[in-house]
Image (cartoon, rainbow, N blue to C red):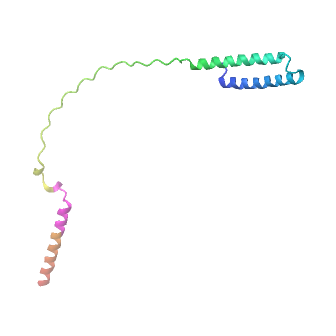
Amino acid sequence: MPIRTATLNKQIQHNGQRLHLAMASRVRSQGADHSPSDEEQALQEERRLLKEAKAQRQALALAPKPKAAKVVKEAKPPKQPKAPKAAKEPKEAKAAKSGKDHKPSRAEKLAKKAENLEAAKKASKKSAKT
């Protein structure tokens, strides 16, 4: 399984810390004039290889990825047109209907109420006279 770039970054960081310690211990014990020790050279080689692997992975990530092929759908045959409907007979006129289905409007209701009140007043007056 390939190593992730993030893992390589961490490995490079740890390698750099070990290399720094090795260099510091060499300078402290032998002085800066001496050549690098075998441990230092091994750490430098490992660091170089890690950086090359990281560069390879980054180049691979920038490369174009294969894309899935588009699915080509088959064309459906056109639908057959529907047959024209038969003409309907005209409906009867609304005026010919009886008054049962008619719903009275607000104005008609108020007019009827006023008529009923007048009729009630006249009826009460007639009964008082007799």
Q: Main secondary structure of the magenta part?
A: helix
Q: Is residue 125 above or below residue 75?
A: below
Residue occupying the point 82% across, 22% down: 23
Nearest to the observer: residue 29 or residue 59: 29
Question: Image check: 92 left or right of 106?
Answer: left
Q: Quadrant of the C terminus?
A: bottom left
Queried whether the magenta region covers residue 55, the answer comes back as no
Question: Image check: 83 left or right of 56?
Answer: left
Which residue reaches farthest right? 29
Residue occupying the point 27% across, 23% down: 79
Queried whether the magenta region covers residue 110, the answer comes back as yes
Residue occupying the point 15% across, 73% down: 118
Q: Position of residue 6 (x, y in %)?
A: 66, 26
Number of numbered labels in the structure image: 0
Question: Image check: 31 left or right of 123?
Answer: right
Which residue reaches farthest bottom? 129
The range drawn in magenta is 100-113
Q: Is residue 36 above or below residue 123?
A: above
Q: Quadrant of residue 80?
A: top left
Q: Position of residue 51 (x, y in %)?
A: 69, 19
